[in-house]
Image (cartoon, rainbow, N blue to C red):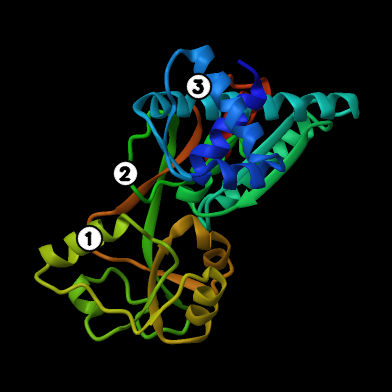
Amino acid sequence: MESRQVRHFLAAYDAGTFVAAAEQLGLSQQAVSKSILRLEAQLGVRLFERDGRRVRPTAYAELFLPHARTIAAETDRFRADLGDMLGGRHGRLRIGVGPSAAADVVASAVKMITTERPNVRLSVLAGIYEMMVADLLLGKLDVVVAVRQVDRNDPLIREEPLGDIRYVVLAGANHPLAGRGRLTLADLKGARWLAGANIGAVEQAIEASFRAAGLPRPRPEIETTSVIFTLAMLDAGMHLAILPEMLVARDLEMRRLVRIDIDAEPWTRPLIVATRVRAPKPPIVDAFMASLVEAMR
């Protein structure tokens, strides 16, 4: 089996036709078709059912798919590491960071890594967890740090918890509820709400708290996925929002925002670090994960 055959298989699987795969690879349709036929002969199974211009993956193709993605990803990783070594670098680390809550922890861990290993090449990319997991499986990222917004069980992804992120009710320093001490959820009745950015699965816990208090969950007056806009509106206006406490730590210290103390069960979601199960973990990944644990303290 050759690595190029694996890439031809992946292109055909993702594109759905040999013609589209060939265009993507910059090859002729005949070259892609022959390459996959040779691969099928070597494996002794049929990977695609030909249906006119389209191809349908067989059960053998589905079995081969995660292995093929791992082969392609690790080949790319080796070539990148080799290029870095030839260029005087000692290791590469590509980090995916979820929005908001993970940023400070990752920044602290990166500072530790760059101090201990100044020749490491680092890339830090932001995104939504579900999209970053896809890049992790493709080998475009080595590790993802994010709040787990969706409970999932992917056999190809290893998720290790770093700790819980607490979600809190926030307001601007001049909000009428600021400085009122501990409040009940009923005290929030009539408040103007801003729906914060991508709070995901924690909404179920929030709804449960309001339901237990015999109250409907507040309906937001404004909805946004922009963290910057959310913070600006809270600072300047009369709205409340529920956001990760870690996200607004600096704003709370500077007293631009205040935390509204609520008599309710804590709302939390786990902060996790995700890696590929089938990929070898380079020493730089292990070192970064140890720095993350230290940063969480």
Q: Amino acid at mark 3?
A: Arg
Q: How far apart, in angstroms, are the residues tagged by discs 3 and 2?
A: 21 Å
Residue located 58% across and 62% down the image: 250
Residue located 36% across and 48% down the image: 269
> 85 left or right of 37?
right
User: Can you give x and y, in whole percent of width and height, for residue 17 in the image?
Assistant: 51, 44
> 129 left or right of 209?
right
Residue located 54% across and 72% down the image: 255
3 or 1: mark nearer the eye? 3
Secondary element at tag 3: loop
Q: Amino acid at mark 1?
A: Ala
Residue 102 or residue 238, whichever sits in front: 102
Secondary element at tag 1: loop
Q: Are marks 2 and 1 in contact (CB under 8 Å)?
A: no
The tag on residue 264 is 1
Q: Are marks 3 and 1 in contact (CB under 8 Å)?
A: no
3 or 2: mark nearer the eye? 3
Secondary element at tag 2: loop
User: Compared to 226, does 235 lie above or below?
Assistant: below
Q: Earlier in the sequence, mark 2 or mark 1?
A: 2
**Which quadrant holds the N terminus?**
top right
Residue named by callout 3 = 278
Q: Amino acid at mark 2?
A: Asp
The tag on residue 151 is 2
